[in-house]
């Protein structure tokens, strides 16, 4: 099901669907989002590509975590921290790192992003959610 970017009301997390670290991060977020406020789409998906095109991001740019929320996108460390702020338990405390200048935060983010395949591996295909989680993903059949 492909939701329209214009009508999407839930925050959407766009992630590299073949990256093991990225897929694990999505699974972590699902576990710590009991109210199921987030939706998900891989950057490789039609929805992900549409959002990237809408905001002028290169189609092949898979090195960024993107949070699409209320008509705006938040990338890299800012996107990740904005998601942490909305999770349960103590995870919102991480949002305090927002005070660190973005060039420092994104430098660390970039170092990890550029090495993620080497350190965490890569899948041949995007991770598929379980049938009960499929409704949270924008480009999967319900």
Image: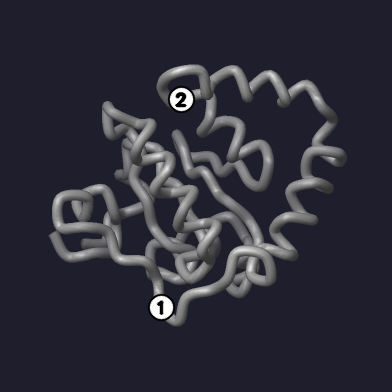
Q: Position of residue 56 (x, y in %)?
A: 62, 60
- Left or right, 105 with reference to 136: right
Residue nearer the viewer, 84 or 45: 84
* On-image quarter of the N terminus: bottom left
Instruction: Give the mark nearest the N terminus, 1 or 2.
Output: 2
Q: Quadrant of residue 129?
A: bottom left
Q: Position of residue 8 (x, y in %)?
A: 32, 43
Q: Secondary structure at mark 1?
A: loop
- Left or right, 129 with reference to 54: left
Binning the other alpha carbons within 10 Å of mark 2 as few (below 14), some (14 to 19) or many (20 upward) gives some
C-alpha separation, residue under disc 1 versus residue under disc 2 = 29 Å
Q: Position of residue 41 (x, y in %)?
A: 39, 57
Which residue shows up at 26% across the image and 48% down it?
A: 136
Q: Quadrant of residue 48?
A: bottom left
Q: Which residue is mark 2?
A: 86
Residue nearer the viewer, 96 or 13: 96
Which residue shows up at 44% across the image and 26% down it?
A: 87
Binning the other alpha carbons within 10 Å of mark 1 as few (below 14), some (14 to 19) or many (20 upward) gives few
Q: Which residue is mark 1?
A: 125
Position of residue 25 relative to residue 57, above or below, is above
Which residue shows up at 46% across the image and 25% down it?
A: 86
């Amino acid at each position: 099901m492909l939701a329209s970017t214009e009508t999407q009301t839930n925050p959407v997390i766009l992630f590299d669907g073949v990256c093991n670290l990225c897929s694990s991060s999505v699974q972590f977020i699902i576990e710590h989002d009991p109210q199921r406020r987030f939706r998900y789409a891989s950057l490789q998906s039609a929805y992900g590509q549409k959002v990237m095109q809408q905001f002028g991001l290169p189609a092949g740019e898979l090195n960024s975590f993107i949070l699409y929320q209320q008509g705006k996108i938040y990338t890299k460390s800012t996107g990740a921290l904005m998601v942490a702020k909305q999770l349960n338990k103590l995870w919102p405390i991480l949002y305090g790192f927002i005070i660190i200048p973005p060039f420092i935060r994104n430098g660390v983010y970039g170092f990890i992003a550029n090495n993620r395949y080497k350190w965490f591996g890569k899948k041949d295909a995007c991770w598929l959610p379980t049938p009960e989680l499929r409704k949270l993903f924008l480009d999967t059949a319900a």
